[in-house]
Image: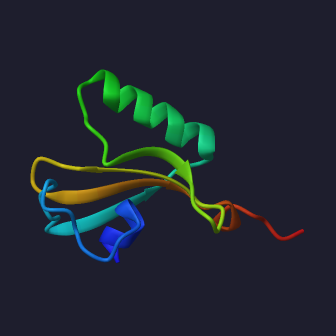
Amino acid sequence: MAAHSCFGQDEWPARVPEPTATVDFELADAAAVEAAVQELKAKGQDFIHEVRTELWGQVTARFTSPEGVLVTLSYAPWLHEQEV
């Protein structure tokens, strides 16, 4: 599933080390995802993919930590909707 989410293919590409685990961070809004990406890039972090909006509306950006963890920065609008 991670290969499909990151690269749109069934197999993890050989050029990228395969992750050992995954962790997702849900952020307050799409702007927070963009700001986090810019901050991390300024500190030298490479991304598997930068900010993009998935077909289902979730905003994501992904990178791999030095320990091999696939990290997703995410904003899923439906998680932030409040019932009136």
Q: Is residue 57 left or right of 37 when viewed as pictured? A: right
- Residue 43: x and y, percent? 26, 24
Residue plotted at (16% across, 55% down):
16
User: In percent of the image, x 75 and y 64: which residue is there?
Assistant: 81
Q: Farthest residue to the right: give it.
A: 84
Q: Quadrant of residue 56?
A: bottom right
The figure's colour scheme reads: rainbow
Left or right side of 74 for 19: left
User: Taking 33 as reference, is 60 above or below it?
Assistant: below
Q: Nearer the viewer, residue 9 or 17?
A: 9
Closer to the camera, 22 or 19?
A: 19
Measuring 33% from the left and 31% from the top, which residue is drawn there?
Answer: 40
Q: Position of residue 62 (x, y in %)?
A: 36, 51
Image position of 61 with respect to 14: above or below: above
Name the image quarter holding the N terminus.
Answer: bottom left
Q: Quadrant of the C terminus?
A: bottom right
Q: Is 49 located above or below residue 35 in the figure?
A: below
Measured as percent of width and height from the top left, residue 8 is found at 41, 66
* Count of marks placed on residues: 0
Residue 19 position by quadrant: bottom left
User: Which quarter of the figure has residue 54?
Assistant: bottom right
- Picture residue at 68% right of the left edge, 60% below the top: 77
